[in-house]
Image (cartoon, rainbow, N blue to C red):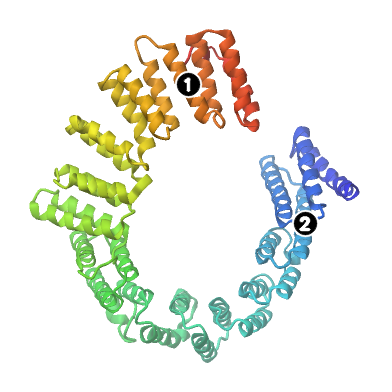
Amino acid sequence: MAEFVEQNMEKMSSIFEEMRANCLFSKIETTKLMKDCKEHEYRLQKNEKKLVDYLNYITFFKSVLKLAIIRRKKSNGQKRGVEFKVAKKICLLYDLATKRFAADTQLWLNYLQFLKKFNNKNVPWILKKMLEKHPNVPECWYLSAKCEYEDQKNPNAARQFLFQGIKRHPKSAELYKFLIRIELDEENRNPHKLMAIYKEALDKVCDVQFCIDLLNMLEAHESEDYEDCEELQKVIRRDLIEKFQHEPAMWDLMARRQLKGLPTFSDDESDENVNKTEKERIEDCCKVYQEGVKKVPKKEMWSLFISCLIEINDTDGLPNFKSKLLSNALNEAGLLEENTGLLDEKYYLLWIKKIMISNNNEDDKTRQKLKVIFKKATEIYPESESLWKEYLEFAQTINDEELENIFDKASSSLKKQAISLWDSRFKHIQSTHPLQLLKFFEKGLANPNISSYIQPTYIKWLAETEGIEHTRTKFQSLLLNSVPSIELFQAMIEVELSQPSVSVENTRSVFQKMTVWFGKYRTDIWLKYLQFEMKHGKEPKRIASIYNSAKINLRQKLVDKFEVAYSLAKMDPTWLNGK
């Protein structure tokens, strides 16, 4: 093992030395790189070979290569030989990995991606090897055809790869699309051949997105003299309408075509659409969507409709007309009795916002409508923090008599995600009904999902309202009757230190208990404890004892970190003063 490693390291040392000579890396950096390189080499020589070891080594060299390129460009260097040597090493590692882990498709694809940047000549050979190992992966056939067509400029070879790939994968939309693209690019293309390929593909694939992609491909190339494909476009449109009546994507496409003035349901409507005003095209677009939501009354269909209307509202002109269309669509989808989730969560929030802006919650009718919407929305999306937050703020604004029930439902639904709602509720009660805060805290402390969050706020509130002695008693009670959070201890220490006369004994007791609970994983609490004793206790023996306790109780990997942090802290006058 060591012999192979040393042989490889001899080869690499010359490369790193060349990098240093070209001022790409310093002597210290090259030494560190050589050390890391050697560790990776030893991992590759283990009896049990692991793909992750090869990938980590490849990643290491890719990082070296990237940094070398950046530094060469900054220094305006022209010599790139060393970069190609590193790239050659990466290719060697990929070769070793693909031989040993040939079943990993992604490994081959990553290798190809790298080769295209640094060693394009080897791409065909690697593609051939990849196809031998993975003939059942459509993407491999696609990449092989793409390489022949785009890199080697060989459309006939590309076709052969696609024909073979389609034979093995007759339902691969990507292979058919690429084959049609090649035929489209032919100088003397044959529209009949294109039609035949399309019909065969539709028979095998029969996917709405496949048809949409083909139609978009044909129309995107109209400026490149694809007029002789108009018949194919008409056939695709007819197939979309006839075969995909219950696909939201089909209705979305046709509605957006109306918006652009493109032909949709009729082959003779193009000229008529072009002459229509923007308002007329928007109205026609909405008519198509309205038909779509009747045929396909699903959330996806409504989302596409509303998304398009939002885009329309973002364009200039006709603001009132566009805004009304959006509001009508939101109302229609949201208030349907059979609606059990036709509106996406974000569209409920948009709907609520629009109503609030336009009506300002001033009349009872608007308030009642918002209540209905909030209730329905939170029933459909009970785990939506955003909806519950809006609902609670609305209820607080109008002093809803069911405010407490709404808050309880939100807390129950969101569980630990309800923290922001508890914070909002606390601030509202504090400003409007401070006498109800005790009841609020009792409810929070009894809730296992929120208790640890409420504890520090409760302690600070007690100190402000009931005094330090009562706060100490309640703090001890919390320690006995619940699982305390580190924030609870920190809050109690803050309260103790804020007293006109700091009780060293009581504050020390809090620190001691905190280290029992959290001293195994937190170096910061030991440092705070030592800082407190240096400022307030001033007993060297006690300080030394705490320091030793920290080293004993902390996890072994944290001890060095603690010792370094403590040594640095003692040299800082501000830290010694407790700041």
Seen at 41% across and 21% down, the residue is 493
Instruction: Say which residue label 1 marks.
Output: 511
Residue 15 or 56: which is nearer the viewer?
56
* Residue type, mark 2 in image: Lys
Quarter assignment of residue 501: top left
Q: Which mark is residue 49?
A: 2
Residue 258, how many percent across, how many down?
Answer: 30, 75
Residue 303 or 308: which is nearer the viewer?
303
Q: Is residue 50 left or right of residue 421?
A: right
* Residue type, mark 1 in image: Phe
Check if mark 2's residue and mark 1's residue have beta carbons within 8 Å: no
Residue 75, how many percent across, how many down?
Answer: 69, 39
Quarter assignment of residue 87: bottom right
Q: Residues within 10 Å of mark 1 (few under 14, many from 20)?
A: many
Figure check: 209 above or below 47 = below
Between the residue at mark 2 and the residue at mark 1, the CA separation in whole angstroms equals: 50 Å
What secondary structure is marked by label 2? Answer: loop
Q: Is residue 204 visible?
A: yes
Residue 7 or 278: which is nearer the viewer?
7
In front: label 2 or label 1: 1
Figure check: 395 above or below 297 = above
